[in-house]
Amino acid sequence: MGDTILEMKHVTKKFPGVIALNDVSIDVKKGEILGIVGENGAGKSTLMKVLSGSYTNKEYEGEIWIDGKKQTFTSVADAKKVGIEMVYQEVNAMYEASVAENIFVGNLPGSHVVDYKMLYTKTQELLDQLGLEVTPKTLAGSLNSGQLQLMSIVRAIAVNPRIIVFDEPTTALTDSEVDILMNFLERLRSDGVACIYISHKLEEIFRICDRVTIIRDGNVITTGNIGDFDQNSLVEGMIGRKVENMYVKSSHKIGETVLVVNHLSVPHPTIDNRNIVDDISFSLKRGEILGIGGLVGAGRSEALGAVFGQFTKGVTKQVKINGQEVTINSPKDAIKAGIGFVTEERKRTGFIQTMSIRHNLSLISLYDLPKRYFIDRGVEDEKAGAIFGRMKVKAPSMETMVVNLSGGNQQKVVLGKWLMKNPQILFIDEPTKGIDVGAKAEFYKIMDELACAGVSIIMVSSDMPELISMSDRILVLSNGRITGEFDHDEAAQSAIMKAAIADQ
Ligand SMILES: Nc1ncnc2c1ncn2[C@@H]1O[C@H](COP(=O)(O)OP(=O)(O)OP(=O)(O)O)[C@@H](O)[C@H]1O
Ligand SMILES: [Mg+2]
């Protein structure tokens, strides 16, 4: 490990009603990976936005030093000039442009006209390095969230930076894609690049980081070599207490069949004459938690989305609820039929960014309007307040706009919105993506309570411990087909993985 390349000294950043960072100092050496951990809203992303020039030097107090020289960044371009690149927590893509254009935006090869041949060759080389199986010409809008996440990583490394920040780079990646990323990080480390790695997945922190800084409520709690921590001490540093029992699952009665889905097929969004979900049938019982495992791209989210009526083009399906056939051609139909859906891609479909937490939480209840004619403010406040408190949404008040929340707290709002609605059937896609360990434990408790109260849940998850611990039954999808079914007691990680990569 070499010399210190980056120092951030005494950084303080305030927002109205919030001190996001309070006198924070960190440093990173050449060829080192520094982990940063902390609860949702602790200030991790804000610190990185300071580093990347997203906030100008007038908007915070403190100093940034690179190679022993004090820097003044007034824009993101300034930070890029000295070799700082970011992989953001929220994927920002131009969905109408190709993968190649997304990767090289701002640096397109060619002097006057873009040299597309060169662009595609260079892009292909980079895609191969990260094992991303899409073509340079593919439209970004047709990629799934895992592929988008890998694309934004490729975009960051394309310019050979000296310092790279990864802000939760693996939330949409499956285990094998995480492996690829980890190998890649090791390569960056041996090339002398300095990396900052933010994640709520502590096993990743232990696997790849050399040192770790713990932040709580905008304050650095401690920094140390990774070897000086274990899971418990890290969690305790982050949330100030121990988490005794992560996965709560109480035994309860599983009742009669509530939902039957027959012969569900969904056409592939980009490949002609191929189905991304290929003639699958499954059912769900009262109070049951049905887990759906598989790799990113296996068709899991598409299956749920198609049942929910999010897309209908070319979809074939038969849906029965409580023995009655129902027609679901839109999310509105699905909600009327008693189904709720916590989507994976919150930015695209999860919430309205420029509305307050309160209104986002009660948004879905608006579908009841024709029956009730007005929203009962008192009831809305009480319900929203209860969920707000339980999920520990970190914000000055319920009137805070969702766009100003940290990534994990936005996810809590999306979850809370559906919990308020009390649906009979709840679809949840990657529920704990990006939320901290304390909130995770609380969410599992809520999910268990819902199941005990007779709510039937289908949960798509790439988090193996979560899938195995919380599901009563697990279906595994591979290439759009069901390749495995396991009961809670017989589900083992190895068997699930085997089914997930089963060849059709
Ligand atoms: N633009 C903004 N306006 C107002 N408050 C903000 C803004 N950006 C961040 N905050 C607040 O600053 C605090 C720190 O947020 P930050 O996004 O840095 O958290 P984080 O550690 O990255 O959390 P997560 O793990 O959920 O991503 C939070 O309380 C957040 O609501
Ligand atoms: Mg963040």
Image (cartoon, rainbow, N blue to C red):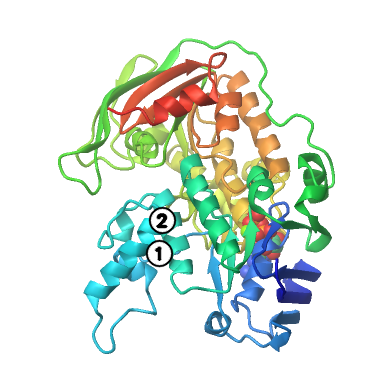
> Where's residue 461, x and y in %?
50, 35
Residue 408 in the figure: left or right of residue 462: right
Q: In the depicted view, which residue is nearer to us: 54 or 117?
A: 117
Q: In the depicted view, which residue is nearer to us: 116 or 98?
A: 116
Provide the residue designation for mark 1.
93
Q: Residue 148 carries which label?
A: 2
Q: Which amino acid does label 1 sit on?
A: Ala
> Where's residue 494, x and y in %?
51, 25
Residue 449 in view (yes/no): yes
Residue 354 in the figure: left or right of residue 28: left
- Which quarter of the figure has residue 112? bottom left
Residue at x 75%, y 29% (from the top left corner) = 245
Q: What residue type is labelled 2?
A: Leu
> Where's residue 229, x and y in %?
80, 47
Relative to residue 180, is residue 221 depicted above or below? below
- Dot 1 or dot 2: first in sequence order is 1
Front tag of 1 and 2: 2
State the count of labels.
Answer: 2
- Which quarter of the figure has residue 261? top left
Q: What quarter of the picture does the C terminus occupy?
A: top left
Residue at x 28%, y 29% (from the top left corner) = 327
Q: In the depicted view, which residue is nearer to us: 51 or 495?
A: 495
Ligand 2 rendered quadrant: bottom right
Q: Do the residues labelled 1 and 2 touch (CB within 8 Å)?
A: yes
Residue at x 54%, y 14% (from the top left corner) = 490
Q: What quarter of the picture does the N terminus occupy?
A: bottom right
* Crowding at mark 2 (Cα within 10 Å: few <14, some 14-19, many 20+): many
